[in-house]
Image: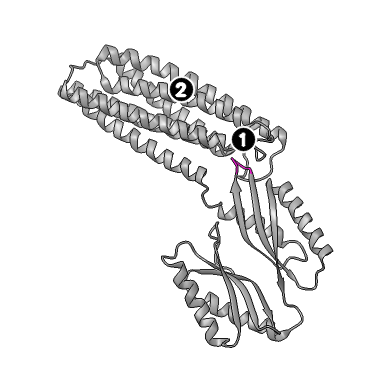
Amino acid sequence: MKHKKGYKRSMSEQKKRESIIVKTSIIGIVANILLSVFKIVVGLISHSIAIILDAVNNLSDAASSIITIVGAKLAGKKPDIKHPFGYGRVEYLSALVISMIVLYAGITSLRESIDKIIHPEEVSYTTPTLVIVAVAVVAKILLGTYVKNVGEKINSDSLINSGEDAKLDSVISASTLVAAIIFIFTKVSLEAYLGAIISLIIIKSGIGMIKDTVSNILGKSADPDFASDIKAEIRKFDKVRGAYDLILNDYGPDAYTASVHIEVLDDLDANDIDKLTRDITKVIYDKFNVAISAIGVYSINTHDEEIKNMRENVAKIVLSHEHVLQMHGFHYDKEKKIMRFDIVVSLKSKDRDKIFEDVIKDIKEMYKDVEIIANMDTDFAEAKKES
């Protein structure tokens, strides 16, 4: 069930998604418990701290899968009076808990490894030991690839994090195998030092997962392609001349509310605009699963060639500045000599306020007797430069 991020799911698809998450997590639990048991036995027999730490990490992976199941079940709850936007963000919280488990496992492992460096123990390996470790490497590669691929297909951060962690485990197990081979041929034990390196890798991975998940919780920028698709759909309406200022609020995987501005001709009446905004709201929800909570309206001067030329001149000035992505909402009141418009300045700019001031200054030089009322907008999806 490959699903394009943010697009409408039916109730049956949502239930199927939850079922896939649970099924994949159960496979992860069983696989990690079996691998952990094998590694603990091998580690105790060989006195290998690296293998034992790897086994403990497998147990934490099993716990992560349990959290993923709980998170998926809670996130699937229907909206209620307490949480009218649903419980979708619970999936982000479960992903955060998994990330913290990974980080804790890394810190604990580092402490144990340092202790073994200070108080070393003799290690011993047998052929069955090495075979089991090698099998574990292959098993974790397959498990990690499977879980991550499923997570990407159904847009589940928890499964993606679990899959990444499992693939990392395969690297850790492979390193343990290398250390064992080095010991067999050279009698040089790198176990404790390898354990420390493994721990640092786990810590780094945990921190990276936490950063990504916190970014989702805080509200990161929308997928530019997704935002562009929504605006393109809005522009398909005959009476719409432009769609701007789209803000997407994320309430969990594929659950959004939004607000947007549209440009329309100034000869539309209230009934026309009411019908248009209702139609837009319905189409966007049906196709993208995005509930538009507000649609603002910009009117375009249609009966005055002088104003049309003024708009083109102002647009040239505005877009000549670096990091200015767009101008929209232009309107000129001839009687009062008031010019209104919005400009979008990129978040990549080091000084957005300075760019905005320079734009207004240049326009005032051309239109000295005109009052300029301008707003600096943000393109939260950082779309390409548009006019």
Q: Is residue 366 magenta?
A: no
Nearest to the observer: residue 129 or residue 274: 274
Tell me the kind of residue under disc 2: Ala
Could one spot residue 157 in this view of the protein?
yes
> Residue 146 appears at what percent x and percent y?
51, 31
Looking at the image, what colour scheme do you see? one colour
Q: Is residue 4 above or below residue 192?
A: below
Tell me the kind of residue under disc 1: Tyr
Residue 294 lies in what quarter of the image?
bottom right
Nearest to the observer: residue 39 or residue 241: 241
Labelled pair 2, 1 in contact (Cβ < 8 Å): no
Q: Quadrant of the N terminus?
A: top right
Mark 1 closeness class: few <14, some 14–19, many ≥20 residues within 10 Å: many
The residue beneath circle 1 is: 87
Q: Is residue 86 above or below residue 292?
A: above
- Left or right, 382 with reference to 124: right
> Residue 226 appears at what percent x and percent y?
61, 52
Q: Which mark is residue 62?
A: 2
Q: Is residue 280 above or below residue 112?
A: below
- Left or right, 135 with reference to 121: right
The number of numbered discs placed on residues in the rendered structure image is: 2
Q: Which mark is residue 360?
A: none
> Residue 28 appears at what percent x and percent y?
49, 24
Residue 42 lies in what quarter of the image?
top left
By secondary structure, the bulk of the magenta-drawn segment is best described as: loop
Element marked by disc 2: helix
Determine the residue positioned at 44% across, 65% down.
Answer: 349
Could one spot residue 387 in this view of the protein?
no
Which residues are drawn in magenta?
251-255
